[in-house]
Image (spheres, rainbow, N blue to C red):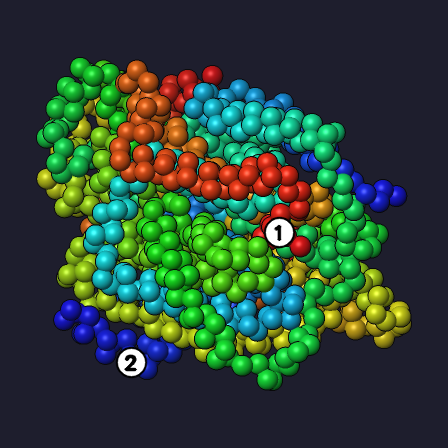
Amino acid sequence: MIQRINSDLAAGALGLVVFAVFWFNRGTLSPLSGMFPDAVLMVMLAVSGALLVKGVLRADIRPAFPDGNAGRVALMIAGLGLWWLGIRYVGFLVTSTTLFFAIALSLSRTVETLSTRRALVCAAAAVIVVGGFYLVFTQILYIRPFRTPLP
Amino acid sequence: MTRSTSRLAAAFAAGAAATALSVGAAAADFPERPIDYVIPFDPGGESDVTARMQEPHLEEMLGVSVNVSHQPGGGGAVAWSEFQNNAEPDGHEIIGINIPHIVGQPIQRDDAGYATDGFEIVTWFHFTPNTLIVPADSPYETVDDLVAFAQENPQALTIGGSGTFSGNHLEVLRMEEVADIDVTYIPFTGTGPLPAAILGGHVGALMTNSMLGVQMEDEIRTLAVASEERVPALPDVPTFKELGYDIVGGTYRGIAVPEGTPQERIDTLREAFSEVNEIIGEDQVPLGFIMTDYGGDEAWEIVDQVYNNYSAFLEDADD
Amino acid sequence: MDMLLAAIPQILQPHMLITIFAGVAAGLLIGSLPGLTATMALAVLLPFTFGMDALQGLAALGAIYMGTIYGGAFTAILINTPGTPSSIATTFDGYPMAKQGRALEAISAATIASVIGGIIGVTALLVLAPPLARLAVAFGPAEMFWVAVLGLTLIASLSSDSLLKGALGGCIGLILGTIGVSPVGGETRFTFGIPAMQGGVSLIVALIGLFVIPEILSMAARGRAALSAPSDMSLERFNFLPVLRKVISKPVNIIRSCVIGQVVAIIPGAGGNITSLIAYNESRRASKEPESYGKGNVDGLVASESSNNVMVAGSMIPLLTLGIPGAPPDAVILGVLMLHGLRPGIELFTESGVLTNGFILSMGLAALMMLPVGLLGGRLVYRSILKTPHYFLIPTILIVTILGTYALRNNVTDVLIMLGMGVAGYFLRIIGIYAAPIVLGLILGTIAEQGYTQTILGGMADAVPQLRLLDNVLSQILFALVLLALLSALLPRLLSRKQGITGSGPTPPGNE
C-alpha cells in the first residue's frame, strides 16, 4: 500500500484530468458563453503544468492516509455508492436505514465487541433517526419525498 | 371551517355545472390527498408569490392541503424535465409553467429534457405584458425618440432584461425587427437586479414585465406596454400597437399536469384556479398583472401564437 | 421619529414577543441543519405567517432569517460544517476551538458577536438606509466584476500552504460554477447530456459536500468523534463573563467586521456569502498574531459571526428602499411585502412607516433574543453531540446531510453531486487542496463572468469594449483595491522565499 504521496504531482495530474473532462465536453458555445470557461480552463492548464514541474523539482511529499484506518474510509465510500444504487430499487427509507445500521454497527466495533444486543441497539437507532428525520422533513417542512419507486 | 365548506360546495357545484356528465362523481373522489404544487423557480419570484396567494384559497376550494415546493434550476428546465419523466398523472401533482420558457427552451437546447407538448395545460391564469422602461431623467420621452436614437447609433443603446431568450429578450429582438433598429440587449439574472441597473444608469432602458413599471412608478417612465389593450394598473401608458409598432407579448403563467391525467380532474383543477383568480385578482391587478383563464384548446392557441412569433429567433440561436 | 416611537409599543405586545422568540428558535434549529439555508427556512415557514397581520408576519420572518444565519454557526463550530454559506469563515477558528475542548467558549463568542452584529445592522438600517441605498445602485456590471475579482484574491491569502494548489482549487470552483445555463448567452454548458445538470452545481450542495463528507470520512477513519470533552473546564463550571470580556476587549475587530458586513451586504448580488470571508481575512491581516488564525483564535470567529449578522439587516436596505434583494433570502421577504400589498420604496418609510419601523425594530429584538436562545440552545446541541457516540453521530450527520441537500431544490441529482464532491474533497484535502478556495471560486465565478460579459456587451458600440471595465471612479477604486490585495498577499510570500526561509509558513485556515 502506498504510504506517502507526491502531492504536487497528484494535484497537477488531477488538474489535467479536470481540464480534459471539461475541454472535451465543451461542445459549441457562442463567444458570450464560451469566453469565461475557456479562460478558466487555460489558467487551470497553466497551474496544473506548474504543479507538475514543481512536483518534479521540489516535491511536497505527504503521508497518503493521515487519518488512520484507510479500510474504513473505503468501506464508507462503498456504502455511499451502494446507497445511491439502492434508493432506486428499494426506496429511500429502506436503503437509508440499512446504511445507517451498517455504518453504526461496523464503526462501533472500535469500542465494543459485536453482540446481538449491540446489533439491536444499532437497528433501533437506525429506525428512529432515519424515520424521525424523514417525518420531520416530509411532514413539518413539507419537503416532497424522494421520487423513487418506494418511499 | 363553515366558510371553507360552503366555498367547497360552491366550487363543486360550479364544476359540475360547467363540465356536464360524471363530473360530480369524479370530483367527489378527487382530490383525495394533498396537492403537490411545484414552482420551478426560486422562492420570492412572481411565480412563487402568485402560488402563495393561491395556496390558501385553493385549499379551501379543493378541501385538501396544497404544498408549494420549489425546484429551481436551468430557468425552470430541471423541474419541467423531472416532472414530465416522473410525475403521477392523477391530478395531485401540478407544476407552474411559463410562456415563453416552455416554448423556447426545447427549441434552443439539445438537452432541455422535456417537450413543450408533453404537458396537459390546466390553465394560463395570468399574463404580464412586456413594458419598455427608461429612467425618469432619460432623454427619451416616447418610443419614437428611443427608436430614432437607436437608428442613428447602432448597438449604442443598451436595453436590460431578465435572461437570454426569455420573454424580455425575445421582445427586444422583435422590436429590433419591427422598428428596424440595432440595440444591445444585456441579460440579468431574473427581475431582481433590474431596478438597480436602471437606477444606477447601467443600462439605457429596460424591457421588463409590467409589475416593475408599477412598482417603480416614481423613478422611471414607462414608454409602452406590449399588450393588446392598456394595462389597468398603468392606464396612462400606451400600447406598442397604439404607437404603430406590432409588438404584443409577455409572460403567461399557468399550471400543467402530466400527460394522461383524467380530463375531469383537469377540469376540477381549472375550475378551482379560475375561482381563485377572481379572488386574488383584487390584489394582483393593481400590481400590473392581467388575469386570464385560458384552458384546453385556447391554452394551446397561445402556445402556437408564441411559437409562430418567436421560433425564428430561437432557431437562429440553436445554430 | 414619531413613527419609530409609535412602532415600539406595537412590537412589545406579548403575541409579538412570542412570535419573535419562536421565529428565532425555529430559525436557529433550521440553520443548524446542514443544507437548510435561510432562503429555505423562510420559504418553508412562510405559510405559517399567512394567518398573521403584516407586521407580525414580517417580524416572524425577520426573526427566522436572523436565527438561521446565526444557527449556521453551531454546525460550523461543532462539526466543521457551515450550516449556511455565510458561516464558512466561522469554521476556520470555531472548529479548532471545539477540538481543543473550547466549544462552549466558541459558541458563546459567536453568540455575542452575532448579537452585536445584528444590533449594529438594525441601527444602520434605521439611520442610514437612504444614503446607503444610493451606494447600492452604484454597483453596475463593471463594479461587480471587480468585486468578484477582489473576492478571488482571497484565495491567495486562504491558501498559504501552497499558492499553486490554492489557485487550482479556485479554478476547479470556477469551472464547476460554469455548469448549467450561462448567465449571458443563455446556452447550457457542460451538462454532459443530463437534463438535471442544467441546474448546475448549487453552491450549498458543493458546500455541504466539501465540508461535511470529508469530515465524516475522516471521523470514520480515526474511529472516534472529533470532539472530546473539555479536560480543564467542566460543562457545569463554564463561565460566560470572561468570554464576553474577551470579545468586547477587541472593539476594533468587531467594528471593522461590522463595517465590512454592512458594505458588502448592500452590494446587490454579492450577498452575504462572502462577507464573513472578507471580514475574517481583514481581521487576520490586522492582527498582531496572524499565525494563530486557523488554530482556534477567537478573534477570527468573532469577525466572521459579527459581519454575517450585520448582513441580515444590512441587506434589507436596498430591499426596502429600492426593491433590490441584496441576498437570496431577501427575495422571499420581497415576496412577502408584495403579498401584503406593500411596495418597496420611500413610501414604505413614510406612509407605512410605523409598519416598516416595527419590522426593523423587531429584527433588533430578534438579535437580542439570540442571546438567551443561543446560549441555552448551544449548550444543548453541544451536549448532545458530545454524548452521542461517534458510530451514531456519523450516520446521523450523513442522513441529515442527504435529506438537507435533497430538500434544497427537490433534486436527487444534487445528492449525487454532493456525495461525489464530498468523496473527491476528502482526497483533495489529503493532497493539500482545501474546500475554501473551491467554494470561493464557485461563489464568485458567476458574478465575475456576468459582470465581465455585461460590461463588454454595454460597450459593443465602442472601439475597445474592455475599456468600460475602468470607466468610472468606483470601478477604478475597486481595481486599485484588487492590486493592493494581491500585493499584500503575495509580497510577504516572495520576501520570505528570498530570505531563504523554508518553514512551512502559517497554517492555512480551514485545514486539519
Splitting the image into 4 quarters, where does residue A45 fall?
Answer: top right
Left or right placement of residue C447 versus residue A90 in this view: left
Residues behind callouts 1 and 2 on a single chain: yes
Residue C88: percent from the left, percent from the top?
Answer: 53, 54
- Assign a secondary structure to mark 1: loop
Residue C507, label in figure: 1
Q: Residue at x 43, y 29 (%)?
A: C186
Residue extending farthest to the front is C499
Left or right placement of residue C36 versus residue B172 in this view: right
Residue B222: percent from the left, percent from the top?
Answer: 16, 37
Q: Amino acid at mark 2?
A: Gln
What residue is pinned by disc 2? C13
Dot in front, 1 or 2 = 1
Q: Residue at x 28, y 75 (%)?
A: C11
Pointer 1 or 2: first along the chain: 2
Q: Nearer the viewer, residue B61 or B70?
A: B70
Is the C terminus of chain C in the top left, top right, bottom left or bottom right quadrant?
bottom right
Residue C193: percent from the left, percent from the top?
Answer: 60, 30
Left or right placement of residue C299 versus residue B123 in this view: right
